[in-house]
Image (tube, grey):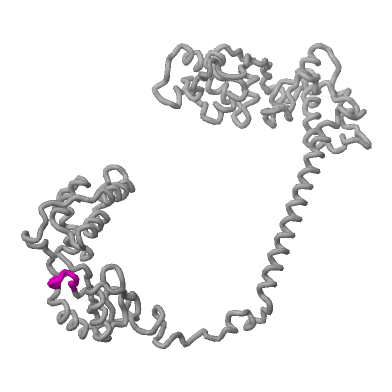
Amino acid sequence: MSVRRLAPDHVQPASFAFSAANENWADEQIAKYPEGRQASAVIPLLWKAQEQHHGWVPRAAIEAVAKKLAMAPIRVLEIATFYTMFNLQPVGEHYVQLCGTTPCALRGAEALKKVCEDVIGPQSTVSADGKLSWLEVECLGACCNAPMAQINFDYYEDLTPENFRALLDDLRHGRPTKPGPQVDRSGSEPLGGGETLKDKALYDGSMIGAGNWQKRITEQREAAIKVASEKAAAEAKAKAEAEAAAATGKAGPTDTKAAPAPEAAAPGRPKPSEVKQPASAAQDTPSATSKAIKDGGPKPAATAPAAKAPAAKTSAAKVSAAKVSAAKAPATRSAAAEVPAGKAPARAAQAPASTAETKPELLAAARNNAPDDLELIWGVGPKLAKMLNEMGVWHYDQIATWTQAELAWVDARLTGFKGRATRDDWISQSKKLATGWRPQSALGDKPVK
């Protein structure tokens, strides 16, 4: 690379400042980069400064860009002198960059250099009228149309000494010019026009036996739309039938004359189908059956066959096997309760006693629209906090006053988190939090057992 230096002092302007429009443009470029990375806009700003200052970058522009970007001037100077896209010397109104690399040289670039010297003068000098200047540059990427030159922002290709001399004369006198190939060719096609893919039959579908392919594609699209519409209608109908069947299945036991449900499924027992009930609630929640047995009430075993009895010609026949199993479960446990202690199986003897449940006091909304941050309770994350809010739990003092029976009621309804409230001792944590104490961690203070 040749040495690149700033223009002599006698041609350097005393100062430089962006115009109002360019100042706004520069601010927009800087805003694209994060704080502390504004120096990344140095190349766009230098390019705009060159565009504003008649096609070249003076020292004052380099210093102005450095100040605007809070950079050392030497850093901006390094960039300006490294990239040949920045002109450090004055250029003419029409700046000619003539390609002199191998493809263009083989196609006559040397003759074009002589035209530049004759019409303009030596390289890097401006013609006396200030209209033209030129410089030999490396490949500009239009080798198939060599030889070529870039004049300001336009490419002029397929140049010859004659048409190049005429082009420079037109530019000097302000006459209109035609960028691109200067001979009779379109783009980069061969001279005289394209020689391949000229048969029109290649484009009407006849070569592949398509016939009226446009009509065929239209029919295919219409058929696809019809199939999609029919599928959507069928899915909607199936969904509606499934929802109706599910609704009938739920209403069936109360709308038919089927045998009554066993006492084990009395109203005091939570139902798995209730809102926010975990699927295992029927097995994990104490039943009214054990209480009935202890009180000498009727035995579920006596009514168990009724639960199995088929309800002919009613919707109860659609009750799933899962519901039948749930109906059997309390009877099994109740039967186990009737076995004398000495004869009970070992597993039954070791089973822990269930804790009775009592519904705690719940709120429809937080007091004064200011809920407590339940996530400060160790073990409560965003999902659990949302579940508690939906349940009606908003404040530490609510949890702090729970009894074990009320804790069990809440725990049975924490779908997917059963046992968490007891394991992490929410009641003790909430008592501390209700006093105004706060843990150091946003995750809460892990209970020590």
Q: Nearer the viewer, residue 80 or 275?
A: 80
Q: Position of residue 398 (x, y in %)?
A: 56, 14
- Is 295 placed above or below 16 here? above
Please provide percent x and percent y for residue 70. 20, 45
Query: Is residue 7 or residue 306 the one in the foreground?
Result: 7
**Is residue 247 found left or right of 210 in the rendered image?**
right
Q: Name the quadrant containing residue 34.
A: top left
Can residue 103 be seen in the rendering of this structure?
no
User: Is residue 418 toward the left or the right of residue 333 in the image?
Assistant: left
* Picture residue at 68% right of the left edge, 16% below the top: 356
- From the image, which quarter does the N terminus lie in? bottom left
At 83% from the left and 21% from the top, the residue drawn is 263
Residue 195 is situated, as x and y percent measured from the top left of the image, at: 47, 87
Residue lying at 15% horizontally and 71% vertically, measured from the top left? 129
Q: Count how many numbered circles sit on residues in the image.
A: 0
Q: Residue at x 56, y 16 (%)?
A: 399
Q: Nearer the viewer, residue 241 or 439?
A: 241
**Magenta stretch, residue numbers:** 124-134
Relative depth, front residue between 14 and 277: 14
Q: Compared with residue 238, is residue 445 higher up or lower down, i.e. above or below?
A: above
Q: Quadrant of residue 173?
A: bottom left
Q: Is 306 covered by the magenta stretch? A: no
